[in-house]
Image (cartoon, rainbow, N blue to C red):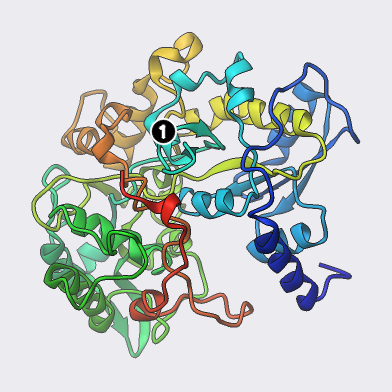
Amino acid sequence: MSGISRRKVLIGAGAIAATAAAAPILAACQPTTKTGGSGKVVVMTDPNEFSDDDRKILEAATKLKIEVVPSNLTTLYAMWAAGNPPDVFRVQAAGVPQYISRKMVKNLQPYFANSKLLKPDDLAPANNFYRWDGKTIGTGDLYGMVKDWSPDFTLYAYTKAFDDAGVKVPSDSTPLTYDELRDVAKKVNKKDAGKRVYWGFVHSNNDGWIDRTAMNMLAEKNQTLYSADFSKLVISGNPEAAKVIRYLYDLAADGVNQTPIDPSPNWMGADFNEGQIALLQYGYWYSAMAESDKTKGKTVFLPAPTWAGVRRDPTMTATGWVISSQTKDADAAWAVFEQYMGGKPAQDRAKSGYQLRQVRPEHRVGGQHRDSGRQAHHRRLNGRCDARPSAGMAALRRVAAARLPPRSDLLPAHLAVADRVRAPRRDPARGRVRHVFHELRRTQPRLPQLCRRR
């Protein structure tokens, strides 16, 4: 940001850490009926997820001016160092423990308790990522809420890539094993005169979530990637973990995945839309945008693969919003938060198909999120335009399981600790993701009391 040097950012970040012990863990509590301050709320979020129509709807509902700042971690800390952080900011669940431990987010339980739109007892289990009881993530008071979430390990197949390779598209009702997935990926992977035509299998948000993928695979055997106190990775002393990491490495060595050796300048979702990825592992939320002009009618939705034959398709990201503990007008920030999470923008997000319900379906007013629209969308996605339930919908039911998965379908909160693996330092201008072993090489310091097993 203009006027803020890197030195000031680092000094400010250090000041946050240095004063954390002295700051109260709970932000000021009871909401009032009126908002004060400047009448403006600064929201840091992804502009691709927050439309100008959303802004206008929220401004009309709250009578507040909303300023949107694009999400960026460097910018967030720069604003924090300058003493002027955004009032509301977008987070992923994996980062919530770190924000809480640094006293950066406000305890919203009193606001939820008094809200007519957002009742704590109505919230879907994915919101447990935003709960903390003073010792453990997953229980206690709410410090935020998911804006969208979904099972995140499902597969999208671009059928043209399979046709070009003379390979049958996998079943949309029987999950592949990860070994089968690798074999298929190698068959549909394609280069022509050294130029990339299709990546066979792209996953883990270009390796940005590689640790979460490994954790989910290991969870099928009731194993973890970390030591009991989350102070270190356990790979060499754990044969199954070593096997998982070897598998992920081999995918890169096979040349079927995007790597620093064979990178893409784009987001992997955009590459799929351009018909450059044969198999993409992404969340159910992506189904609303999986078909582009190029891939329309050539996209199939497949169930999540398995590592050890155990059906798992948890949410591993649970993207949401929190309110800054340093907001100068908490009531105004809550007014925007509440309307975005429980008002028309939330209803529009659910209808669009790129999220699952934030609240339990029995608590939605007017039945505006009936399954018929979503079923029709997935029949179309799997190439079926008839009104009959299809095999594709059987896969969808396994994946989305009534949109209210049991607790085992959530990536366990004790695994989603801070930014469990710190990404190595890199040139921000490159915007590229490192190799899997570079991703896993450096652990993030953790607070034992925050990360204790449940």
Left/right of residue 84 with respect to residue 370 in the rendered view: right
Above or below, comparing residue 376 to residue 309 in the picture: above
Q: Image quadrant for the N terminus? A: bottom right
Out of 362 and 195, give the one closest to the viewer.
362
Q: In which quarter of the image is residue 234?
A: bottom left
Q: Can residue 160 be seen in this view?
A: no
Residue for point 29% across, 64% down = 226
Q: What residue type is labelled 1?
A: Leu
Residue for point 16% across, 71% down = 238
Out of 38 and 453, give the one closest to the viewer.
453
Out of 389 and 370, give the one closest to the viewer.
370
Image coords of residue 60 (percent x, y):
79, 24
Q: Sort mark 1 into few (<14), some (14-19) or many (20+) by Cα contacts within 10 Å.
A: many
Q: Image quadrant for the C terminus? A: top left
| Residue at the left extreme, as displayed | 309
Left/right of residue 159 with respect to residue 391 in the rendered view: right
Above or below, comparing residue 97 to residue 405 in the picture: below
